């Protein structure tokens, strides 16, 4: 048995599919046999074409014309005479290997298309990139897998999955994920939870430990992985799976109930979403609203910025489906592990400390204003609350609010309707913001604590790095003190304080957050019903006393052990 970090609950069993999604290593090898190299190139084109024809037919039957059209476009790229002749000329003229020549030619094409003023041409860049990967994979004997069209149900094994790969995959066929890197709060883990797919991450070298086609069991609650288990283990985990299903079923009785403690203290349990498609899961899990809509997922899987209209449609769909329940929509939080290729952001030494989130929006004001206009236009369709991410100073907050006010003034001039009472809030993810939350609270309608980042910045522990994962602790007294301080400062100014980091759905921490007086808990929808059941069983008065004890403790271990003893 191998142990990793349980990132998304549930038991999954099946055959593994190992993904080779790292960049291919392509060297500028000089070749002697030009004809053999050309043959290698044409053979790879032929194999790619046959593969694409098969995928296209499958896509047409299973997903319809829109998806099939993507592969039709790939076939066109594959047959592009200029792409072919430029590669052949390069092989013949410069005598480099076919893979190197093809890579250089496709990179030139990509750069050319990216620089074009025409959106349609810019969108072709993804097609060229995908085709290039497929052909190179054939030349190098590395099979690439299209996650949106899987032939059979599998457990995916990879170094990591990017959030956009996760968003694109065929959810019916992916039984679970196993990754080498990442922790509970990496965005791959967060996506797995929102898709309700069991996942274990941070396994170190799982891609080399398992072999293609191995039968594997994963336990997403306990972070366990069993490779080619014996009959006894298969029976045991089948039983456990059944029990999980039963527990899940029994939680349904909490779906319509209020989130209230045994002594009558009411809180709000909301859900975190990434796309309008996540609303079904949110509603079926009894959410009282959306506490965090990570809008960056609307910006991913694209080669250019989403238009105002596209964004408006997404925001309107979410607001209408939830109305009159509250929906907190966070403005773009790109950067860190959520990269947008078309923003052309230079590679940074420390992306999580770099040019990201509100820092991008305050520089790229057109991009920001487009999003704010789409949000305000959508505000008339429901109960919208706008939230700014990664604020680290009062100056940033005031700048962001000024831009919002400018957009409102422009909309007034243009007589475009919006809800003038939309609440405006900010995330507390940076220690500097937590420390001055008394000042910030005077300028917003609410605060929402983003503990995924707050922990990594407070403890200087990269949330993606499994080697130092033991230091990334929600029980750290420094983190708990900051949280308490933010809640108290918010309440002193008469505003509500929520939490949308993963801590808010953690059963071990909920009693403390309750005792601290947190008003709103926003979590992966899958955690809502277990959290509500727990809250019903707790007394607020007792949790206040319990929290007082916790806040006097000095180490993460003592705190965690004490919580385990009491509950
Ligand atoms: C957080 O940092 O806690 C948060 C909710 O934002 P994200 O996980 O998207 O960085
Ligand atoms: Mg964050």
Image (tube, rainbow, N blue to C red):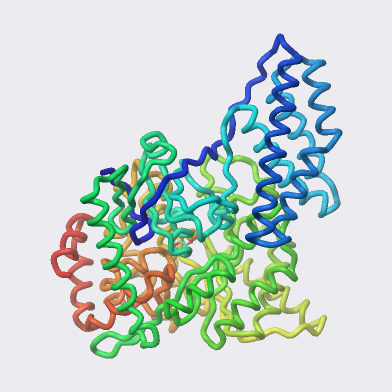
Query: Which quadrant, please, contains the C terminus?
Result: bottom left
State how many labels appear.
Answer: 0
- Image position of 219 with respect to 83: above or below: below
In the image, residue 476 lies at what x, y percent? 28, 57
Residue 207 visible, this angle: yes
Residue displayed at 56% across by 78% down: 385
- Image position of 306 with respect to 537: above or below: above
In the image, residue 235 lies at what x, y percent? 24, 56
Residue 435 visible, this angle: no
In the image, residue 3 lies at what x, y percent? 28, 46
Residue displayed at 55% across by 88% down: 324
Judging depth in this view, the residue of 196 and 72 nearest the camera is 72
Residue displayed at 78% across by 45% down: 114
Most distant residue in the left direction:
565
Query: Which quadrant, please, contains the N terminus?
Result: top left
Judging depth in this view, the residue of 114 and 39 nearest the camera is 39
Q: Viewed as shown, does residue 297 lie left or right of 562?
A: right
In the image, residue 107 lies at what x, y percent? 74, 34
């Amino acid at each position: 048995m191998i142990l990793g970090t349980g990132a998304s609950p549930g038991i999954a069993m099946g055959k593994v599919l190992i993904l080779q999604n790292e960049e291919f290593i392509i060297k500028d090898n000089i070749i002697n046999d030009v004809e053999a190299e050309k043959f290698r190139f044409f053979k790879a084109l032929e194999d790619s074409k046959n593969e694409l024809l098969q995928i296209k037919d499958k896509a047409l039957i299973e997903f319809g014309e829109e998806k099939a059209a993507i592969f039709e476009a790939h076939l066109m790229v594959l047959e592009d005479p200029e792409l072919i002749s430029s590669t052949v000329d390069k092989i013949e003229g410069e005598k480099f290997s076919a893979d190197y020549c093809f890579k250089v030619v496709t990179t030139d094409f990509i750069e050319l298309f990216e620089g074009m003023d025409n959106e349609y041409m810019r969108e072709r860049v993804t097609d060229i990139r995908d085709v290039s990967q497929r052909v190179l994979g054939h030349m190098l004997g590395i099979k690439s897998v299209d996650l949106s069209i899987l032939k059979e149900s599998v457990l995916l094994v990879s170094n990591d999955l990017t959030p956009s790969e996760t968003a694109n995959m065929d959810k019916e066929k992916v039984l679970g994920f196993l990754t080498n890197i990442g922790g509970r709060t990496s965005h791959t883990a967060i996506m797995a939870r929102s898709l309700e797919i069991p996942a274990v991450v941070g396994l170190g070298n799982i891609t080399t430990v398992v072999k293609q086609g191995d039968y594997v069991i994963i336990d997403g609650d306990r972070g366990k992985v069993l490779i080619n288990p014996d009959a006894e283990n298969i029976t045991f985990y089948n039983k456990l799976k059944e029990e999980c299903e039963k527990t899940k079923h029994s939680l349904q009785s909490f779906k319509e109930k209020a989130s209230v403690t045994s002594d009558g203290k009411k809180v709000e349990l909301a859900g975190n979403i990434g796309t309008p498609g996540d609303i079904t899961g949110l509603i079926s899990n009894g959410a009282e609203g959306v506490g965090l809509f990570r809008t960056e997922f609307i910006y991913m899987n694209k080669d250019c910025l989403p238009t105002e209209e596209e964004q408006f449609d997404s925001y309107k769909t979410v607001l209408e489906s939830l109305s009159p329940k509250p929906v907190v929509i966070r403005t773009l939080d790109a950067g860190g592990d959520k990269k947008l290729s078309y923003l052309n952001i230079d590679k940074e030494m420390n992306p999580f400390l770099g040019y990201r989130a509100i820092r991008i929006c305050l520089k790229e004001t057109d991009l920001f204003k487009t999003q704010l206009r789409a949000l305000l236009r959508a505000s008339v369709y429901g109960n919208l609350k706008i939230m700014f991410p990664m604020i680290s100073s009062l100056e940033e907050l005031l700048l962001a609010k000024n831009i919002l006010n400018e957009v409102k003034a422009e909309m007034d001039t243009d007589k475009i309707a919006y809800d003038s009472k939309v609440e405006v809030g900010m995330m507390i993810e940076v220690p500097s913001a937590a420390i001055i939350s008394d000042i910030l609270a005077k300028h917003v309608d609410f605060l929402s604590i983003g503990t995924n980042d707050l922990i990594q910045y407070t403890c200087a522990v990269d949330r993606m790095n499994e080697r130092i994962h033991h230091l990334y602790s929600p029980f750290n007294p420094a983190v708990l003190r900051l949280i308490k301080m933010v809640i108290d400062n918010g309440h002193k100014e008469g505003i509500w304080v929520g939490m949308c980091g993963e801590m808010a759905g953690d059963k071990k921490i909920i009693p403390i957050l309750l005792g601290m007086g947190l008003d709103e808990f926003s979590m992966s929808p899958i955690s809502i019903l277990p959290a509500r059941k727990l809250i019903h069983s707790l007394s607020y008065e007792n949790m206040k006393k319990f929290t007082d004890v916790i806040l006097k403790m000095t180490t993460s271990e003592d705190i965690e052990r004490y919580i385990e003893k009491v509950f």
